[in-house]
Amino acid sequence: MVNYSKIIPTLWFNAENGNISTILSYYKTIFGTNFEVGCIMPLGKTPSGNTEMCEVKIFGQKYSWMSTEKEHHPFNDAFALTIHCENQNEIDLYWNYFIEEGKEVQCGWCIDKFGLRWQVLPKNFGELMSKPKSWEVMMNQKKIVIEEYL
């Protein structure tokens, strides 16, 4: 990861023994070649236990990730990542992966096993929301089902 970004969002995870490899493996499984991992930087013992950091890229967007042994601040609804999907199959792929050990919320939102919030949407979501009764459709959905808007 050579190119420089002035501002990089940092996400603070919690994993057993602060082992960031567990977290990296989880996301590599779903994002495959669209998930790039930099060098793991062991930071040693901190007030939150063993700590490791790593820069990652997801679809080219750079993030700095940190993992600690003890949970410091859990993720919440104040931060989420949105995935714009090509079609229903892609929505289903991400949705099913994240809720397998996570949970469904509403309106295309879900929470993965590490507590990170995702909104999984079709890339034409704005167009779908311009259709009559689209608000009612969305409010009755957890996972977005494109066909229900048509």
Image (tube, rainbow, N blue to C red):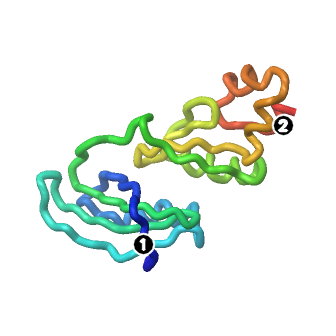
> How packed is label 1: few (under 14 Cα within 10 Å), some, or many (20 or more)?
few
- Residue at the image point whose x is 40% and y is 59% from the top: 8
- Residue at the image point whose x is 70% and y is 27% from the top: 138
Q: Quadrant of residue 38?
A: bottom left
> How packed is label 2: few (under 14 Cα within 10 Å), some, or many (20 or more)?
few
Do the residues under discs 1 and 2 have CB atoms within 8 angstroms? no
Under circle 1, the secondary element is loop
Please give left or right for residue 97 compared with residue 90 in the image.
Answer: left
Q: Position of residue 60 (x, y in %)?
A: 55, 67
- For this rendering, which residue is in front, 102 or 85? 85
Label 1 – label 2 distance at C-alpha? 41 Å
Residue where numbered disc 1 is placed = 4
Q: Quadrant of the C terminus?
A: top right
The total number of labels drawn is 2
- Residue at the image point whose x is 84% and y is 28% from the top: 131
Q: Position of residue 14 (x, y in %)?
A: 30, 52
In the image, what residue type sits under mark 1? Answer: Tyr
What's the mark number on residue 92? none
Residue where numbered disc 2 is placed = 147
Q: Position of residue 145 (x, y in %)?
A: 75, 37
